[in-house]
Amino acid sequence: MDKVSALIVAAGSGVRMGGDVPKQFRTIGGKSVLAHAVDSLASHPRVDEVRIVIGAGQEAVAREALGDRDVGGLIVGGRERSESVANGLAAIDGEIVLVHDAARPFCPAEVIDRLLAALENKNHGAVPVLPMNDTLATGDLLLGAMVDRKRLLRVQTPQAFYREDLLYALAEAGKRLATDESQVLVAAGLKVATVEGDVMLDKLTTLADFVAAERRLATNLISRSGQGFDVHAFEGPGPIMLGGIAIAHERGLAGHSDADVVLHAITDALLGAAALGDIGEHFPPSDPQWKGASSDRFARHAASLIAERGGTIDHVDCTIICEEPKIGPHRAAIRASVAAVLGLAEEAVSIKATTTEKLGFTGRGEGIAAQAIATVRLPAAPARADA
Ligand code: CTP
Ligand code: MG
């Protein structure tokens, strides 16, 4: 199968949007527009690499916007878009190129599926398009004549090309300016197929587009719950760790790490909500580096995995099950500690306790159990036929 290189052009200065920072480096839902664009392309199974073209002097702001995403070296673009694309093409080697605007942060995987299928069906290029639904007219202060919308299309990106064909078309175009590459291929007499685009791909041009994109992102988040359960047996002398704080007790808890049942149950609840496995998978007890580890690291890691996916933690509720120690006097401190570990408001954390009426292993005072539930919001994963 051909190698697919995605090229994101981010060298514009966003004049129509205005502001101090070019639009591709601004944030939506706490994540930069550019990072959204990178993630939506990089997560497609057919995309082998994602490279980015930035403007001269944009290196620092681009690196800041990208975090630790793997995009290789940043490519410096030019004054005109065609120059930016040409510089990008010189730095990539995929037989197939997806040229994408950084200003379009959300690319559904289905659009890439359709583009590659159309390209590989004997075309030189493929573009996502949407029909024009509004009435169209010429005019200025006074309304002019209607324009037949049936003949018009809204052309989006990413646009798929064979690298060789795009290089040929750009050379043919010379200094002639185009707002996208599909036009360059059409002008060179090459065949560009149209596939169905998506409103999620609409370009951010003005502040109003940013407001709409924030709203779109919020409605794209779905609520998910996860549960966690953990037990540690009493062994040796205290104190014991519960929710990240040390509580004086004559007996301690046995465990490979610091045996904090509360943070372990909460960590598993968070991982469960995101369907990211369990604590043992992320921090194997067989691994000596977690011996005696402070469990807030585990909980912080689970929280960061959710944040990296563009999610938020809405609420965590934990029930501690034991006869001793009495939790009541420590409840507020445990709650504050868990909230601090997860970076949440205290109102988003609930700590409860119960005995089991002297029944079972907790009733006999052999150990402490904890169960937790976490409610998080995560971007809805698009349904995929090949998943
Ligand atoms: N772009 C680029 N190099 C240029 C011009 C534009 O890489 N010389 C990129 C932009 O960063 C953007 C995409 O091409 O991701 C689409 O361009 P546009 O929406 O016009 O962005 P800007 O040119 O930045 O905005 P404006 O036209 O309002 O100044
Ligand atoms: Mg522009």
Image (tube, rainbow, N blue to C red):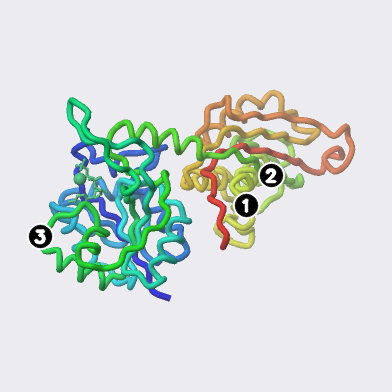
| Residue 35 in sight here | yes
Ligand 2 found in image quarter: top left
Residue beneath disc 3: 175
Q: Would residue 118 be found to the left or right of residue 361 on screen?
A: left
Vertical arrangement, residue 386 with respect to residue 309, above or below? below
Task: Work out whether mark 2 precedes mark 1 in sequence or the reverse, and give the earlier one.
Answer: 2
In front of the other: 212 or 308? 212
Query: Helix, strand or loop at disc 2?
Result: strand
Task: Work out whether mark 3 precedes mark 1 in sequence or the reverse, and give the earlier one.
Answer: 3
Q: Position of residue 350 (x, y in %)?
A: 65, 29
Query: Helix, strand or loop at disc 3?
Result: loop
Q: Would residue 54 be found to the left or right of residue 299 on screen?
A: left
Query: Helix, strand or loop at disc 1?
Result: helix
In front of the other: 13 or 383? 383
Q: Would residue 22 be found to the left or right of residue 238 on screen?
A: left
Confirm or deny contact between disc 3 and disc 2 (CB under 8 A). Answer: no
Point 37% across, 52% down: residue:
129
Q: CA distance from mark 3 to mark 2?
A: 61 Å
Q: Position of residue 136 (x, y in %)?
A: 29, 37
Vertical arrangement, residue 108 with respect to residue 22, above or below? below
In front of the other: 285 or 318? 318
Q: Would residue 297 be found to the left or right of residue 260 on screen?
A: left
Q: Position of residue 94 (x, y in %)?
A: 33, 71
Q: Amino acid at mark 3?
A: Lys
Mark 3 Cβ inside 8 Å of ligand 1: no
Judged by depth in the image, the label closer to the viewer, 3 or 2, is 3
Residue beneath disc 2: 228
Which quadrant, please, contains the C terminus? bottom right
Point 73% across, 35% down: residue:
320
Residue beneath disc 1: 279
Q: Amino acid at mark 1?
A: Ile
Q: CA distance from mark 2 to mark 1?
A: 10 Å
